[in-house]
Image (cartoon, rainbow, N blue to C red):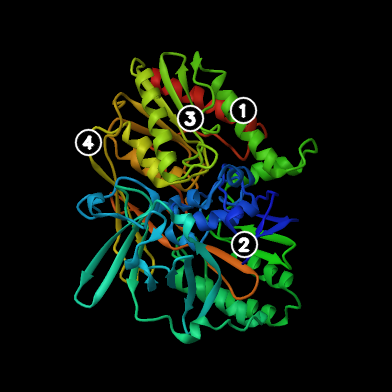
Amino acid sequence: MSPVATRQSCLNSCKVERVAEWGPAAFSRYRSAWNVPKVMARLHAFWHMRATAGFFTMDFLNNSLLNRMKTLRELAPAFGMRWHACIALPLIFALTACGGGADPSADKPAAAQPIFTQGRLDPALKGPWRMLGTGQLVDWKDDGLHLFQEVKSRCYPDPQTLQSHVIDGFLFTKKQENEKTTVEIHASANTPSAVTLERVKEIPAHCRQPMSASHSDIFNVFWDIFDLDYAFFKERGIHWNERKAELEKLASAAQSAQDLQKIFVKALGDFNDYHTGVMHAENGTSVSYFNSGNTASYKMLRQAFEQQSDVDSLDEFQLTFLNGIQQSAMSRLGSSSGKLLNGALLWGVLPGNVGYIGLSQEIDYADGSNITRDRALIAAEMDRAISALQGTRALVLDLSVNNGGADAVSAEVAGRFSDRRRLAFTTRSHRPQGRAAQDWYVEPRGTKQYLKPVYLLTSDLTISAGETLTLMMRELPHVVHVGQPTAGSQSNKLEKSLPGPFHVTLSHEINTDSRGIVHEGRGIPPTVPVVIFDPADPQALTHGHGRALDKVLELIGR
């Protein structure tokens, strides 16, 4: 897909009226809502970022989120969507991949080399590669990565090129075993591998030929991509093969790309996966996007938007909701930091000498920031907060409305509560093609650590990297997980271009916690249930968070 939309938010689906050409100017990042134009940028940024799936409309596409993300490089934090943050292409490099806390025995930063030196691509990286675990081939040239999609018996060129500046600052390690050459790409130093490349002799000639774009052909490619690489049919109760016959007939009869988009939406409509969606650019003038994430609280938010007339934009409505949550928290703080890092961080002291840290995303902490800068920014602010809150008797870490971001940032936050190194979770590709599993660890970070009782607050609006932060925190013995289960969208997001004017994103990597449990689809359950957003309560969106904080303070006071 060549266009990048410019502004318009949508929960689950949207149309964007203006579209700009994909190019350097289009690469900017996201904050807590989707902006289609920036979304596409995010896609490329996928290289580093986890697939922020935020409830603010599809993760990356959320306007605020995307608006805040100023460079694909940021998106790259996860290499993979998260279209939140983090969408495909680069999504390829999965957002999650940007995390920090890898096993140093497997990923040694000392051996990593810069991809670019004085603006020049390292010669060892030029030429054809297979990107393991994604079903893609890459021809790496000075101007960027040229992608080719391999889908069962089909192979076709991706119309987009991942431009070199998007991955400036990335590192690589090279390994030679007999006749096999592999390269691991790292979004930043001391992080797990974001992408594994295996050297191939050449890109087959037929892969360089554009594929027929009949509606039936496009549908079959769409179907095969999900059939090959979607990892959670069973967990989400999706009987994929049973849907094909009916939808294939509809696709054959489709009269337009809009008709085909409706068929794709019908196919994905009940996935309830914030990392799975489809985008259609039509004649370079309008974009429609569908994201299948649809947790209970998300439904409440959308319904509340539809029942009011004061706010025209769903994106603006979502931001108003987040601001309300933050104001509710600040009203309880005897002293407060105010909103920091583009509004993502808030800390202070609650009644009863209880510390409070609220975090709404793990990315885009400054205009134009990338994964490395975001890690440095959160590290500095967390050090200040932990130092200031050392005298409190307990602390609430509030992730109840958290749109996700980069796992590396999650690791920085969790490290401020860690007493020693522990395995937090392991990520593996659904179809690895030889790519090794990546271990994520939580370990002490920063000038001081907070080792008194910590109460971790989550809900089904805790998404993506917010969930990997939850997995990290749950490994710590002094942490009590309270609230509601998380959204259950933890996978990195893989983005692929279809023949014609479509892009899809899907969950293709599986996270298992230290006990071998997969929480995708059902969410990470709290140890102590506390209702925050109750679908049966009409006032839950306005008063639920405050009541939940009061309940947590009661638990601490016992």
Q: How far apart are marks 2 and 1 (CA)?
A: 30 Å
Q: Is residue 501 above or below residue 379?
A: below
Closest to the camera, between mark 4 and mark 2, is: 4
Amino acid on which disc 2 is placed: Gly
Mark 2 or mark 3: name the one nearer the start of the chain.
2
Q: Position of residue 270 (x, y in %)?
A: 59, 60
Please give the label number shown on residue 269. 2
Query: Residue 358 shows which numbered tag?
Result: 3
* Residue that mark 1 sits on: 543
Observer able to see residue 281: yes
At x 25%, y 54%, the residue is 107
Percent of width and height locating residue 487: 50, 47
Foreground tag (1 vs 3): 3
Q: Distance between the residues labelled 3 and 4?
A: 24 Å
Q: Is residue 545 left or right of residue 233?
A: right
Report the side of 57 relative to 419 (left or right).
Answer: right
Height in image: 118 above or below 225?
A: above
Q: Which of marks 1 and 3 is nearer the N terminus?
A: 3
| Residue at which label 4 appears | 420
Name the secondary structure under disc 4.
loop
